[in-house]
Amino acid sequence: MSPGAAVRGALALLRRHAGRVYAVSLAVTLVNTVPDVLRQLLVVDDPSVGHALLSDVVGFTTGLVAQLWLTGALSGLPADGRVRPRGALGRGTATALRAVRTSPAAVLAGVVLGGAVSALVTIPPSVAALGVDGVVGPLDAPSAAAFTVATVSDVVASALTLPFLALVLVLVAGSTRHFAGKGGG
């Protein structure tokens, strides 16, 4: 599948199933926000580069798990419009791996476009609340209001962009069937 076809297909599915897709995405994002906020709070006054990198690794890992779970949960959407939470992480992992093997360019297009939208939603309010140094460097000790603004912008960005990439992966992988042992509804 070409990158353009994957992007157009994902956007069409998002329009057709927006309510259901964004509700599931928001739920996944809110669950992922708990470890995301905790990891930030653990290094809020810590200037150590090692701890900041460890915090970023934890954030990337929890975000990846959320992305894979949502991908698996939405894998049946093109075929029958259903969201399937049971076995979603396994299905999502298999779908993502298949998509990367099938069309790395289409997956890259989904990542870049989703990342661009995420940056547009996240960076301006985060810079306004935390300042450039607070966004780029160590978090130091931001006010509760500034931290809340940055966190809410992250939640909004994730809830908006996770389903887009999930559907790009699903379409590229051709994942409308159940994987062995991972089916169910």
Image: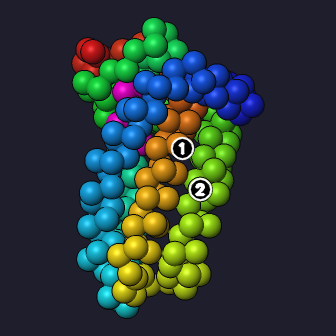
Q: Residue at x 34, y 41 (%)?
A: 28
Q: Amino acid at mark 2?
A: Val
User: Residue most toward the top?
Assistant: 80
Spatial separation of the CA atoms under disc 1 and disc 2: 10 Å
Quadrant in which the C terminus is drawn: top left
Is residue 70 found inside the magenta-colored segment of the image? yes
Asked if residue 51 shows in the view, the reply is: no
Question: Is residue 123 shown left or right of residue 148?
Answer: right
Residue of label 1: 161
Q: Secondary structure at mark 1?
A: helix
Residue span colored magenta: 67-74
User: Residue most toward the front?
Assistant: 145
Question: Is residue 113 shown left or right of residue 152?
Answer: right
Pointers 1 and 2 in contact (CB under 8 A)?
Answer: yes
Front position among marks 1 and 2: 2
Q: Is residue 138 above or below residue 26?
A: below
- Residue 82 location in percent, x, y? 40, 15
Res. 121 mark: 2
- Residue 11 location in percent, x, y? 64, 28
Is residue 146 found inside the magenta-colored segment of the image? no
Query: Does label 1 or label 2 sit earlier along the sequence?
Result: 2
Q: Residue at x 56, y 81 (%)?
A: 131
Q: Amino acid at mark 1?
A: Thr
Quadrant of the image occupied by residue 67: top left
User: Between residues 98 and 131, which one lies in front from this camera angle?
Assistant: 131
Q: Residue at x 26, y 67 (%)?
A: 38
Tag 1: Cα neighbours inside 10 Å, few (<14), some, or many (≥20)?
Answer: many
User: Between residues 60 and 140, which one lies in front from this camera angle?
Assistant: 140
Q: Which colour style is shown?
A: rainbow
Asked if residue 96 shows in the view, the reply is: yes
Question: Is residue 73 shown left or right of residue 164?
Answer: left
